[in-house]
Every structure is written in C-alpha cells, then in structure tokens.
Amino acid sequence: MKSYDTISAAIAGLKAKGYSLDFNISFDTIKCDEHNICLNPSEFEITEVHRFEGETNPSDEEVLYAIQSKDGKQRGTFVSAFGIYADAVSNDMLQKLSIQH
C-alpha cells in the first residue's frame, strides 16, 4: 500500500485506482447520494486505510478509507474525523471502521 503525504494526494491516488465514489456515513450505512448507493457494513470491505494528523495540532486527525462493495462494482472513499468531530455511528459500523488493514 502506498504512503501519502497529504489527504488530498491520497484521495487523488485512490481515484486514479478507481475509487471514484464519495461516501458519507449515515449512522448504520455508508451512502453515495450522487449515485443513490447505500451499503450496510456487511455489504462492503475496507481495502485501504490512511491516517493523517493536522500540521498544527496532532489531535486534528482524519482517516481516509478506501471502500469497495463486496461485489466489486462500487468503489469509493470516506473521510472521517476523530475525537469530538467524529460522526455518530452504529456499533456495527464502528466495528467495521475500526478494522486495521
């Protein structure tokens, strides 16, 4: 897995590898509203994880997930903040996003 210096470089690199959808979390699913796609934790795999800390504050951490549906047809990215900025998620989704690759 390639290492990236910035989150924007990582997103560009993943898009070049076919991760073109922009996923957002919706408590117990991930969604791509632009393409009307909704996947629950059992329907997707996390294929790469990239962590980035803020330049001025190491607690400003973001994680970029490369996500692929189990059938391989939908591929995209999801960016999540940690700490007080983290999204509210279900236990199943939290467990899925906590998997270390």
Image (tube, grey):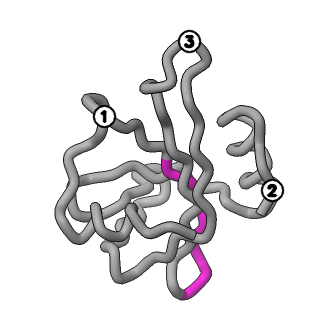
- Decide: is 43 above or below 66: below
Dividing the picture into quarters, in which one does residue 101 lie? Answer: bottom right
Is residue 34 rendered magenta in the image? Answer: no
Disc marking residue 66:
none
Give the x, y percent position of residue 45. 50, 76
Query: Do labels 1 and 3 touch, CB within 8 Å?
Result: no
- Locate residue 72, reporting x and y percent: 61, 82
Name the secondary structure under disc 2: loop
Residue, x 66% and y 36% (percent of image)?
A: 7
The type of residue carrying mark 3 is Thr
The mark found on residue 83 in the picture is 1
For the point 81% across and 56% down, the residue is 2
Residue at disc 1, secondary structure? helix
In the image shown, does 23 or 53 lie closer to the viewer? 53
Q: Amino acid at mark 2?
A: Lys
Q: Tell me if residue 11 comes above or below residue 71 in the rendering.
A: above
For the residues marked 1 and 3, what is the alpha-carbon distance in whole angstroms?
16 Å
Q: Earlier in the sequence, mark 3 or mark 2?
A: 2
**2 horizontally vs 22: left or right:** right
The furthest residue to the front: 58
Q: Image point 20% across, 46% down: which residue? A: 88
Element type where label 3 sits in the image: loop
- Give the quarter of the image for residue 36: bottom left
Q: Position of residue 14 (x, y in %)?
A: 73, 54
Residue marked by disc 3:
56
In the picture, the disc for residue 2 is 2
Lower position in the chain sequence, tag 1 or tag 3: 3
Look at 18% across and 65% down and name the residue there: 91
Magenta span contains residue 74:
yes
Q: Residues within 10 Å of mark 2 (few under 14, many from 20)?
A: few
User: Looking at the picture, does residue 86 appear above or below residue 85?
Assistant: below
Q: Residue furthest top?
A: 56
